[in-house]
Amino acid sequence: MHAELESLTTEALALVAAASDQAALDQARIDLLGKKGRLTALSAGMRTVPPGEKAAVGAKLNEARTVISEALEARQRGLTAAADAAAVAGVDVTLPGRPQWQGSLHPLAQMQDRAVDILRRMGFALADGPEVETEWHCFDALNTPADHPARNEQDTFYFESGHLLRTHTSSVQVRTMEKADPPVRIIAPGSAFRRDEIDSTHLSAFTQLEGLYVAPDVSLADLKGTLEQFFQALLGPKTRTRFRPHFFPFTEPSYEVDVELHLTGQPTRWVEIAGCGMVDPAVFTALCAKRGDRVYDPDTITGFAFGMGLERLAMILWGIPDIRLLIENDARFLRQFA
Ligand code: DAH
């Protein structure tokens, strides 16, 4: 038994040492220590060993098992280390790492955040309304009659149900006043849709920011002061604003607002930037009829409203020459705002 154990151990060590890959080593383990392995077979011989020698032979068997197991483990460590080394062979660990791309807010989102931030500090609360609107909320309640060009099928996206994609965020004015009693001081940023040809200044889906302040004694001076403050906070303290008479169905009087831009490297110039005016009494009358109360009685209530395109604001603020850059998601463009 002793001799057999010794020669088995010697052979086993040679076998393990010769195992040049994982498959060979696994096979050696099975052949040596497996259920039908050689050491297991030798152990079975214990039965025939005379009782007096059992302890000594048993000890030898254990010793052989330990030696073989350790050899297998050592070889396993060697193979694993070699495989690890092969996996990184040719990799230059001294090269600088590739930095993970860091995301950032889209310029339009940044623009919206800035505008909302300023107006919230001025006391406006955020309001919301659906993009799929009724004609009443988008047009009728805003004193826009059925024959107004904005309601033309060629200008607006209609659904068979009679709903439409809102052509402006002014519908949120109506949505808000339908539910809330005055005073109301809200802003509503959101998408608007028109059947416009897409070009360098038009998109068929774009973003607006609506504002509305309704209370008993709101004046034109309040409107002018609010927008002047807003544009100075947004575009710089030197920014001057100009109110040009205009027409909107839902305000009377109505204005277009121009701002004078002082952009580095460019001559100062005036650009049109927003629409605004005093809420038309007809809007309040429509709300009284809908609500069935006199809370928005046009004889006692007043208000101002304003609306502007956020893409246009972003283009002006950052000198973006083409509105389509804002929807193409070209990382070379977007990265400049990271
Ligand atoms: N809704 C107008 C548009 O889409 C913008 C606008 C003009 C909004 C005057 C207003 C306003 O609230 O008072 O062109």
Image (cartoon, rainbow, N blue to C red):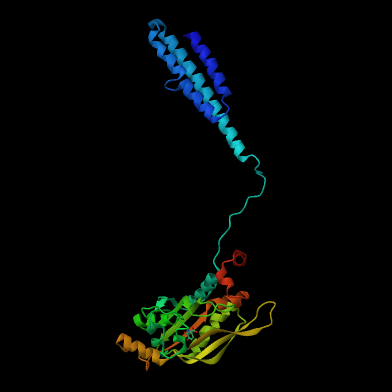
The residue depicted at 58 percent of the width and 80 percent of the height is 232
Asked whether 41 or 271 is in front, the reply is 41
Residue 23 seen = yes
Depicted 95 relative to depicted 149: above or below: above
Depicted 331 relative to depicted 140: above or below: above
Asked whether 93 or 140 is in front, the reply is 140
Which percent across, then down, holds residue 214? 41, 85
Q: Residue furthest left?
A: 292
Count of numbered circles on the image: 0
The residue depicted at 43 percent of the width and 18 percent of the height is 40
Which percent across, then down, holds residue 327? 55, 70
Which quadrant: the C terminus?
A: bottom right
The residue depicted at 41 percent of the width and 83 percent of the height is 138
Drawn side of residue 56 relative to residue 320, left or right: left
Residue 296 seen = no
Which percent across, then down, holds residue 234? 57, 77
Which percent across, then down, holds residue 253? 48, 93
Depicted 327 relative to depicted 1: above or below: below
The residue depicted at 70 percent of the width and 77 percent of the height is 265
Depicted 108 relative to depicted 274: above or below: above
Asked whether 280 or 220 is in front, the reply is 280
